């Protein structure tokens, strides 16, 4: 159970980094867009209502995009930065490749020991009624501590 909590915390940190960087990027892009307004275009002189409407909507969308564009770019840059941070600093596992020798992919089930015996991992005495983990292949019986040790390796 503690293992899962730890993983969730780690995932939360990644999520937070992504959000912070993307949000910061969008914010910086917005600021940049506000500080660098597009060069005002001289509206062509026209008299018809259609023409005026076109010019207004055109300049309006221009203004929107002059802010939205940098915001999107900033967000994309922030996202890229966040991904780099997540992939480099918050790498979920470091070292400890699969060459550690012991098989960690346990397959089996929890049962109650029917007989006295010994744990295949630590040779601890297992008494009848103890909760043990029985794995068919390789055939062995593990006590709870050993299962924890094998599955929660950091
Ligand atoms: Zn054991």
Image (spheres, rainbow, N blue to C red):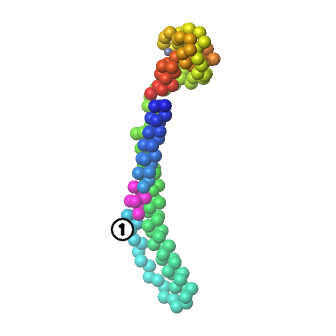
Placement of the C terminus among the 4 image quadrants: top left
The reply to whether residue 111 is in sight is yes
Magenta-colored span: 24-30
At x 46% / y 65%, what residue is drawn? 68
Residue 49 versus residue 5 in the image, above or below:
below
Residue drawn at the location 46% of the way across and 31% of the way down: 2
Which of the 4 image quarters holds residue 14?
top left
Q: Position of residue 44 (x, y in %)?
A: 48, 85
Q: Give the camera-side residue of 1 and 18.
A: 1
- Front residue of 116/98: it is 116
Residue 67 rendering spot, x and y as whole percentages = 44, 67
Q: Residue under circle 1?
A: 35
Residue nearest the observer in this picture, 42 or 138: 138
Image coordinates of residue 121 in percent, x first then y, are 51, 14
Q: Find out whether residue 27 is within the magenta segment.
A: yes
Report if residue 138 lies within the magenta region. Answer: no
Q: Residues within 10 Å of mark 1 (few under 14, many from 20)?
A: few
Q: Residue at x 60, y 12 (%)?
A: 114
| Label 1 residue SS | helix
Q: Locate residue 131: give its quadrant.
A: top right
Q: Give how far across and how far down residue 95 sits, in percent.
A: 44, 28
Residue 21 located left or right of residue 106: left
Residue name at image x 40 percent, y 39 percent: 89
Residue 56, placed above or below residue 110: below
Q: How many marks?
A: 1
In the displayed orientation, state which residue is furthest to the bottom.
Answer: 47
Please, which residue is most extreme toward the front here? 129
Report the magenta stretch's main SS.
Answer: helix
């Amino acid at each position: 159970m503690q293992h899962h909590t730890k993983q969730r915390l780690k995932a939360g940190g990644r999520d937070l980094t992504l959000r912070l960087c993307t949000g910061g990027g969008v914010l910086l892009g917005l600021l940049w867009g506000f500080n660098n307004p597009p060069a005002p275009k001289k509206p062509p002189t026209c008299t018809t209502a259609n023409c005026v409407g076109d010019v207004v909507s055109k300049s309006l969308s221009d203004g929107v995009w002059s802010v939205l564009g940098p915001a999107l770019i900033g967000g994309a840059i922030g996202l890229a930065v966040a991904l780099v941070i997540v992939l480099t600093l918050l790498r979920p596992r470091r070292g400890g490749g699969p060459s550690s020798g012991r098989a960690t992919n346990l397959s089996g089930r929890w049962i109650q020991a029917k007989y006295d015996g010994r744990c295949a991992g630590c040779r601890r005495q297992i008494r009848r009624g103890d909760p043990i983990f029985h794995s068919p292949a390789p055939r062995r019986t593990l006590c709870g501590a050993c299962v924890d040790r094998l599955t929660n390796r950091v």
